[in-house]
Image: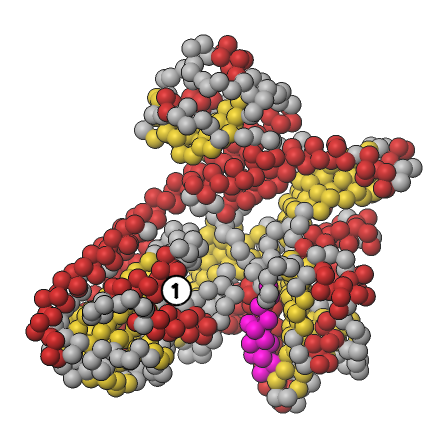
């Protein structure tokens, strides 16, 4: 079969996989809120064609589907010159490409890098994202260059096989990488490509609506059953997983127009490739949609491919079409009156700059008697990384609006539009609550989004616990003014209690009005208005929300509706946060119990460990470490289980116990790794693990090391010079039962320090892994050469200096573990044995304190 690339239908799976994967990684490298794409050569001489587009509807990029190679534009220059083109913002664009700036007068930056392989340039990989004018290198051109080179190697392999790499069809428009999470029905399945069987639960069959025999035929059939409209993307992810490279979580559209979240992993080798396990999540409408259905003004949303995902009843009425004809349809096809240059420019501006956009549109619809009517609407567009939310506001009626110049309409209604935006912006941005995982984060979102929109200065959130209200968050209230309400029971005659017990919000235009309704209620000297909102989620009382205003004011019916709807969103988010905190506490407790609290000691060795749990998401990971007595020496162990949560912690505990048992038996490192690998495969938890095992003789300094997919250790020599070791290793544990793990022999001189670590310590979003390892190597050297050091070296000080910067990082997405081991001089062993024992106990205690504090 020929593998010529002629468009979305004619392209082979491996090439499509590479194209989609390169664009997705480019968007991730750019920070997520970006538009990415790949241009490839076409059969028309001197013309590049857009092959894959992600982050923007393809129709909005139609003027740039074809790109002459000698046109003075960034894409053509990157292809023709073979060099990256980096533009930080609109100023750079205007200075270097004034024609492009005139056609795209928005605040955004770009990076385009050539895709080369075997000395041939096949196309250009690039991203467009919000401008960052004050950053020297705001766009990750080095990461894009690496990804473009990998893509070039794939295309070159196709090209040398005799099939020309050209693209002559329309672009393949795919969704950007998923950034959110979903809750709802979850279907699980296991696909064996060799046996052509699919084993699944009833939820999966209900979501796909197919029979096992049909779905198991091929990845394409399975992909179409999961998502008819996203078959190429899903089948690409399935094939990658079957080859042992599970894809990242993926949002797709189901046959009914709803969203689904997919996640795949490998379950172990089959006769041909690997079995693929996966889940399909149907999130359902969610609390945001239910609340938005009640809004008096229109709200609709579309994903970045242009498909409409949600329309509330009022928006359907204003747009002149029923919801069933809008949801799941392309925006510019069902609303053709948006297909005008001025309106398209506004949409492009929102998607490229990530800034909210407001503009007026004229559209026509059928009246109640079949006559054609024209209306003016104001559209407020709020872009997000996955979904774009739009608010629709009536601007005026036909005869008055059409005869007025658009500029006059805009300026004449500015005050009204600002008022509408102030009132309804928090509803649209209330979706931000879905990303808050803790009560603290929920409160921060409310303070950031709700208070400014309503010109509110004070916020207090009380949560219900054992039939009493306890203050969880407050801002703006005078110090001590809320102390008297802490811990009040549900029988107290207070507005914060009554709003919760009755389920009805309470609005007071002034403090005098509230005092009249609740005589004797203590209050501060302020005279402003108050709003008490019940926080009730799925019929369960959660707490109360109090809003305080600086001055007396009235509350319109629209504002009351908005605030009531927001209270439901806040309650849902807080209830979810409470459940998440409970589960995280259980998982954290499990992990605490499984990690060692004391390290084995030796008079000639000093060891130190520093473990920092991830802070982003408060979910536990699978890092583990150990120092075990092995014969007359020590075994140093560090590992990392794939994934997070209770399952990862449980798997980690099983592996740690197994390796400890093998180490106590003083088995060679390769046997320890092989035995642990087979054990993990037999346990079949559906997870992998990386590991590094070092068997060390403290007397001679001889060491034997084996590595299973884990980052390379560091060795700091006695003079402080530090190198990255190059240990040959095998695949991660839990994949191949016949995998081998070669052993490397080392020798530690007295005063040398061996450093083992997990990838959380060296991985950073937007940075290359090699850069992180180099930064850790330099930090270890600097820590050992720190000025002012007197006396012997303490590894705890070294560990503290290395991780000092990490301790102040607020968004650690993964656990971080550092295990240090230093060989002492044999002559110092007797005199320092007691000190070494005390240091070992102190290190274990310090590590435990750090885990507890974090």
Q: Which residues are magenta?
A: 138-153
In the picture provided, is 435 more to the left or to the right than 373? left
Q: Is residue 666 above or below residue 548?
A: below
Say left or right for 664 vs 502.
Answer: left
User: 10 Å neighbourhood of mark 1: few (<14), some, or many (≥20)?
Assistant: many
Given residues 180 and 455, the one toward you in this image is 455
Check the image and report above or below for 122 versus 658: below
Does the magenta stretch mainly form a helix, a strand or a loop? helix
Q: Is residue 144 magenta?
A: yes
Does the magenta segment cover residue 458? no
Whether residue 705 sits left or right of residue 109 in the image: it is left
Q: Residue at x 32, y 55 (%)?
A: 646
> Given the current orientation, which residue lies at the most extreme left position?
830
Q: Secondary structure at mark 1?
A: helix
Where does the image place residue 641, in percent across and percent down from the top left?
A: 34, 65
363 up-or-down from 479: above or below = below
Identify the residue under disc 1: 760
Image point 77% across, 57% down: which residue?
Answer: 105
Residue 246 % position (x, y)? 47, 68
Q: Is residue 415 left or right of residue 271?
A: right
Q: Position of residue 452 (x, y in %)?
A: 59, 35
**Point 37% across, 21% down: residue:** 484
Give the x, y percent position of residue 776. Answer: 38, 70
Task: Write the residue at 50% across / 50% down.
Answer: 182
- In which quadrant of the rendered image does the N terminus lie? bottom right
């Amino acid at each position: 079969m020929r593998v010529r690339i002629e468009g979305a239908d004619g392209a082979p799976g491996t090439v499509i996989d590479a194209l989609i994967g390169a664009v997705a990684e480019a968007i991730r490298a750019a920070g997520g809120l970006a538009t990415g794409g790949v241009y490839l050569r076409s059969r028309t001489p001197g013309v590049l064609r857009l092959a894959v587009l992600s982050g923007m509807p393809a129709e909005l990029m139609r003027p740039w589907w074809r790109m002459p190679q000698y046109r003075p534009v960034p894409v053509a220059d990157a292809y023709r010159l073979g060099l990256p083109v980096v533009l930080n913002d609109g100023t750079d664009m205007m200075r270097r490409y004034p024609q492009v700036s005139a056609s795209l007068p928005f605040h955004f930056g770009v990076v385009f890098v050539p895709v080369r392989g075997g000395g041939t340039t096949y196309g250009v990989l690039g991203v467009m994202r919000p401008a960052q004018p004050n950053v020297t290198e705001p766009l990750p051109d080095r990461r894009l260059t690496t990804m473009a080179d990998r893509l070039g190697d794939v295309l070159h392999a196709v090209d040398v096989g005799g099939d020309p790499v050209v693209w002559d069809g329309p672009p393949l428009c795919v969704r950007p990488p998923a950034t959110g999470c979903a809750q709802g029905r979850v279907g699980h399945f296991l696909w064996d490509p060799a046996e052509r069987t699919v084993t699944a639960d009833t939820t999966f069959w209900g979501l796909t609506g197919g029979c096992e025999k049909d779905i198991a035929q091929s990845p394409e059939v399975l992909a179409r059953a999961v998502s008819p409209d996203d078959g190429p993307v899903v089948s690409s992810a399935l094939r990658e997983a079957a080859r042992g490279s599970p894809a990242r979580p993926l949002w797709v559209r189901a046959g009914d127009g709803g969203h689904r979240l997919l996640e795949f992993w490998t379950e172990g080798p089959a006769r041909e490739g690997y079995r693929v396990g996966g889940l399909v999540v149907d999130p359902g409408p969610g609390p945001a949609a239910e609340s938005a259905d009640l809004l008096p003004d229109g709200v609709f949303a579309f994903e970045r491919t242009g498909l409409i995902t949600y329309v509330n009843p009022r928006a359907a009425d204003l747009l002149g079409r029923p919801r069933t004809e809008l949801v799941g349809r392309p925006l510019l096809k069902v609303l053709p009156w948006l297909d005008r240059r001025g309106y398209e420019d506004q949409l492009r501006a929102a998607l490229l700059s990530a800034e909210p956009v407001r503009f007026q549109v004229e559209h026509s619809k059928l009246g109640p008697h079949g006559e054609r009517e024209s209306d003016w609407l104001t559209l407020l567009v709020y872009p997000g990384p996955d979904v774009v939310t739009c608010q629709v506001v009536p601007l005026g009626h036909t005869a008055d609006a059409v005869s007025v110049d658009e500029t006059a309409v805009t300026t004449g209604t500015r005050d009204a539009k600002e008022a509408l935006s102030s009132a309804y912006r928090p509803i649209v941005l209330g979706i931000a609550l879905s990303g808050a995982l803790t009560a603290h984060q929920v409160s921060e979102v409310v303070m950031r989004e709700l208070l400014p929109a309503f010109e509110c200065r004070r916020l207090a959130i009380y949560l219900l616990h054992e039939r009493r209200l306890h203050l969880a968050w407050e801002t703006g209230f005078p110090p001590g003014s809320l102390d008297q309400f802490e811990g009040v029971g549900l029988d107290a005659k207070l507005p914060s209690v009554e709003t919760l017990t009755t389920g009805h919000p309470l609005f007071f235009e002034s403090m005098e009005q509230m005092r009249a309704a609740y005589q004797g209620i203590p209050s501060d000297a302020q005279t402003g208005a108050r709003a008490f909102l019940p926080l009730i989620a799925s019929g369960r009382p959660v707490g109360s929300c109090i809003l305080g205003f600086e001055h007396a004011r009235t509350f319109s019916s629209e504002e009351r509706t908005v605030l009531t709807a927001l209270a439901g969103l806040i309650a849902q988010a807080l209830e979810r946060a409470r459940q998440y905190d409970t589960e995280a506490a259980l998982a954290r407790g499990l992990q605490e119990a499984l990690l060692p609290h004391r390290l084995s000691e030796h008079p000639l060795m000093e060891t130190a460990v520093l473990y920092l749990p991830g802070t982003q998401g408060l979910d536990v990971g699978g890092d583990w470490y150990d120092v075990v007595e092995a014969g007359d020496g020590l075994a140093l162990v560090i590992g990392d289980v794939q994934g997070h949560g209770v399952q990862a912690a449980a798997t980690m505990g099983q592996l740690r116990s197994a390796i400890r048992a093998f180490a106590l038996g003083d088995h060679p490192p390769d046997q320890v790794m092989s035995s642990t690998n087979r054990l993990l495969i037999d346990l079949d938890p559906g997870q992998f693990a990386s590991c590094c095992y070092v068997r060390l003789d403290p007397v001679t300094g001889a060491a034997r090391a084996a590595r299973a997919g884990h980052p390379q250790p560091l060795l700091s020599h006695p003079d402080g010079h530090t190198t990255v070791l190059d240990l040959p290793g095998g695949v991660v544990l839990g994949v191949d039962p016949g995998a081998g793990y070669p052993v490397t022999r080392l020798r530690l001189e007295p005063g040398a320090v061996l450093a083992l670590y997990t990838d959380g310590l060296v991985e950073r979003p937007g940075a290359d892994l090699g850069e992180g390892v180099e930064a850790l190597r330099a930090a270890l050297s600097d820590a050992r050469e720190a000025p002012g050091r007197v006396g012997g070296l303490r590894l705890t000080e070294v560990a503290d200096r290395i991780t000092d910067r990490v301790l102040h990082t607020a968004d650690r997405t993964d656990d971080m573990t550092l295990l240090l081991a230093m060989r002492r001089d044999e002559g110092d062993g007797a005199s320092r044995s007691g000190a070494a024992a005390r240091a070992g106990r102190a290190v274990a205690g310090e590590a435990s304190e750090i885990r507890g504090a974090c």
